[in-house]
């Protein structure tokens, strides 16, 4: 099969690999589209270096193919699989979706939304799942602030918070203002022109470059700051210490800081499918790249130029 092959950190080339064989509880997918997010860039580069220590491969990447978000068709089922059958259209996560075929655990898959293309479905799992988990507990009428609202997680954050009945303020740079407005944000703040004001019941921080003290001031006394991620934490730990400081801070201030570690589970993807099928969430696909240009797709996301989501079409 054709795949983007990654033998060492920092580079990948289009090459040929054997089609993988599904094991117990796994299926072989014919990949139609693969989603791209900042995590794809981190795993391609092996940065922050902390990633190498916690199991993604010390000297080189464990997975020879980049890409985790996937949408495709079940080609073959492994032993013990009863949830899916060949021909089923699914989406979820796997190891190595930048390829014609990939093996995925059934526990990380759900049926593809009926009203979504493969490209749209592949744009949902990690970013949508992270936003959904970050917004757990939000109630109708609450005020939600989304930082990085024009990015992958933030663009779902705006839509899901609106679906929960919240009043949503999205913060982004100038080029993403129109997108964030079109996603349904009640207010959009272009941070290059003005700073956000007011207090919020929940702050979803998907940009990560504001001091924790600033986030605290933007949060009601009983509110929560959910720290999704940052690209400003350096190549060693990626800002892991910011999460530790935030946890410590929670002991001394009325607000709660929650460093988010999202999980990839079929049940989460089922919830997202329902949101997409109801029309409450529309996967915001900005651009599709062919497999041969997979590295360009990753670089486009890393450059901060991407608006919403980017996918690789196989
Ligand atoms: N905790 C988890 O489980 C989890 C899961 C998924 C992702 N993440 C992390 O969460 C963060 C957001 O992910 P994403 O997929 O939404 O990323 P993304 O698509 O690149 O969006 C991030 C947004 O943040 C803003 N930004 C501000 N400062 C930035 C900087 N120095 N570098 C890049 N972007 C910057 C950019 O918007 P403007 O142009 O408007 O500034 C960008 O649109 C990333 O750090 C990612 O690694 C964490």
Image: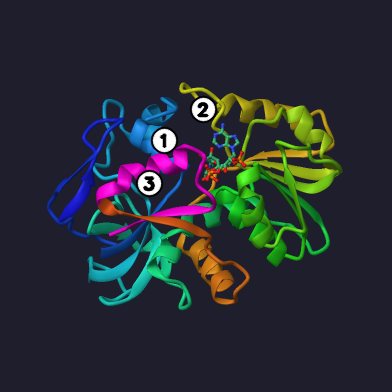
Q: Mark 3 touching mark 1, by CB under 8 A?
A: no
Q: Mark 2 points at which residue?
A: 238
Say whether disc 3 or disc 2 marks the residue closer to the N-terminus: 2
Q: Name the residue under label 1.
A: 42
The response on whether ligand 1 sits within 8 Å of label 1 is yes
- Is there any visible trace of residue 26 in the rendered image? no
Crowdedness of circle 3 by 10 Å Cα count: few (<14), some, many (20+)?
Answer: many
Mark 3 vs mark 2: give the one in front: 3
Rendering coords of residue 281 (x, y %): 59, 67
**Element at label 1:** helix
Rendering coords of residue 39 (x, y %): 44, 41
Give the label on residue 297, or none: 3
Q: Is residue 267 above or below residue 297?
A: below
Q: In which of the image's four quarters is ligand 1 placed?
A: top right
Q: Mark 1 touching mark 2, by CB under 8 A?
A: yes
Give the label on residue 121, or none: none
User: Could you tell me which residue is drawn at 47 percent across and 37 percent down?
Assistant: 303
Q: Give the range drawn in magenta.
A: 292-314
Say whether disc 3 or disc 1 marks the residue closer to the N-terminus: 1
């Amino acid at each position: 099969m054709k795949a983007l092959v990654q033998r060492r950190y920092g580079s990948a080339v289009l090459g040929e690999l054997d089609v993988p064989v599904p094991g117990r509880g796994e299926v072989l997918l014919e990949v139609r589209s693969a989603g791209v997010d900042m995590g794809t860039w981190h795993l391609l580069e092996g940065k922050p270096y902390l990633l190498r220590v916690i199991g993604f491969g010390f000297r080189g990447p464990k997975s020879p193919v980049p890409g985790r978000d996937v949408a495709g068709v079940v080609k073959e089922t492994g032993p013990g699989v009863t949830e899916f059958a060949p021909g089923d259209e699914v989406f979820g996560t796997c190891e190595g979706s930048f390829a014609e075929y990939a093996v995925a655990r059934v526990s990380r898959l759900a049926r593809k939304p009926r009203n979504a293309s493969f490209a749209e479905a592949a744009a949902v799992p990690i970013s949508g799942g992270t936003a959904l988990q970050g917004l757990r507990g939000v109630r109708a009428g609450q005020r939600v602030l989304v930082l990085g609202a024009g990015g992958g997680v933030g663009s779902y954050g705006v839509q899901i918070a609106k679906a929960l009945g919240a009043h949503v303020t999205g913060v982004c740079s100038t080029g993403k203002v129109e997108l964030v407005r079109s996603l349904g944000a009640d207010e959009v703040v272009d941070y290059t022109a003005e700073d956000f004001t007011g207090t919020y019941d929940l702050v979803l921080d998907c940009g990560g470059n504001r001091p924790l003290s600033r986030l605290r001031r933007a949060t009601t006394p009983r509110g929560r700051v959910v720290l999704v991620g940052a690209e400003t934490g350096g190549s060693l730990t990626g800002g892991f210490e910011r999460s530790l400081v935030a946890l410590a801070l929670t002991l001394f201030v009325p607000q709660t800081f929650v460093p988010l570690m999202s999980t990839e589970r079929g049940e989460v993807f089922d919830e997202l499918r329902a949101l997409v099928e109801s029309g409450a969430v529309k996967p915001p696909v900005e651009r599709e790249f062919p497999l041969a240009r997979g590295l360009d797709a990753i670089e486009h996301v890393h450059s901060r130029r991407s608006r919403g989501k980017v996918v690789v079409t196989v």
